[in-house]
Amino acid sequence: MASRVYFTDMHVGMGDSLLNKFKRLAERAGIRNIDFKDKYVAVKIHFGEVGNMAFLRQQYARVLCDLIKELGGKPFLTDCNTLYVGYRNNALDHLDAAYMNGYNPLATGVHTIIADGLRGTDEREIPVEGGEYVKTAKIGAAIAEADIVISLTHFKGHVNAGFGGCLKNIGMGAGSKKGKMEMHSSGTPRISKKRCIGCGMCVRHCLNDGVHVVDGKAEIDEAHCVGCGYCIAYCPKSAIMTKWDEAKPVMNKKIAEYTKAVLADKPSFHLSMVIDVSPECDCDSANDIPVIPDVGMFASFDPVALDQACVDAANKAPVVPTSAADVPHDHGHSHDLFRIVHPDTDWEAGLIHAEKLGLGTREYELVTVK
């Protein structure tokens, strides 16, 4: 049975505003049907890497959180730390990035919480019902302990996933550092000898005798390392990194399984903004021009239908001249925007797997909201 996905474009007349339309969209899509009374509400969002300008403006988050508070909920804005070296690698720098990009309590009216804690190790293990690749997902504690999950997603391109939509915002975004390593890698981490200072923090925090310091530099012991990712979290120089070696279709399927764990047994609601559709993720410290004009805002209780509706709408939009999508292509797809930009990705694998897991359906009815 098709799920309903609600849509509104970015046009406004005199006396109206995009923020008003955003609120009407959420209400028409049924957000008021959720019992928010005295519930902790994790509003999962991407705060944007410092230097990136394509991330969502904080005003949308403010409207959403004000509405949740009006309905009796206790919302907080949240994300988990990253594996890569950057501002969002630990909770303190991550908060600096969020605040610099406008996601601070004065602007949003709510607190910003880094869900997996200072180093990315504060997690809860949640079984994945029907998981083919992941049996137990490692989810940031603050998200796992919330009563309700609301996702607010900036829909854009992604070098590994093809596009970054609702499933990626929730699944990859809510994973702790160990969880992110599990989704990105099929094996053990690697060590940059140039960055390593031989401090031994990795050795002290390894639970499996999987790393040693030899001649002043850390080395992974492949015979004992289980790929848990603790060494990545505790390295003060970010010298230990995932190998990023998981096949891209498998990574998308793991993201679906992590999403299944995050949303298990709790109410959820999802909004996606197909605007400023950059070719790469908001994790990048810079962004190119959008690959398509702004399309609009989408909302649904079904994250799978939502992603499918967004990708369909993006693929119907004209390509922006001189953008990363404005290139000759012959990939066997008539107009697949995200395979044009990233030809070796397979975004569809994640949606097919999510549907198989019972997360939702790719069949949808699009309802327009004025």
Image: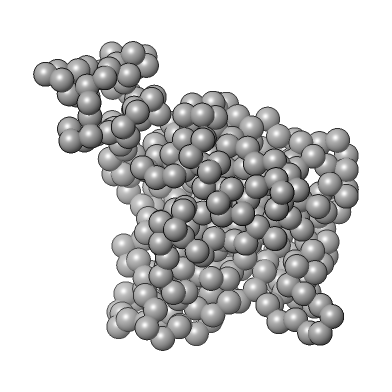
Q: Quadrant of residue 14?
A: bottom right
Please say if 131 is above or below 225.
below
Does residue 298 appear left or right of residue 63 in this picture? Answer: left
Q: Nearer the viewer, residue 252 or 279?
A: 279
Q: Residue at x 22, y 21 (%)?
A: 198
Indicate the position of residue 91 as horizontal and vertical percent values. 52, 35
Q: Specify the quadrant of the image occupied by residue 87.
A: top left
Residue 292 x/y as whole percent: 50, 78
For image coordinates 81% across by 36% down, the residue present is 39
* Residue drawn 68% across the image and 77% down it: 10
Give above or below for 13 relative to 42.
below
Residue reaching furthest to the left: 215
Q: Please say whether residue 274 is visible from this viewpoint.
A: yes
Q: Is residue 288 left or right of residue 247?
A: right
Q: How many marks?
A: 0
Q: Could you say where residue 289 lies in the image, as x and y percent from the top left?
A: 44, 74
Reply above or below: 138 against 330: above
Q: Quadrant of the N terminus?
A: bottom right
Q: What residue is shown at x 86% (from left), y 54% (from top)?
A: 32
Q: Report whether residue 222 is seen.
A: no
* Residue nearest the observer in this picture, 344 or 158: 158
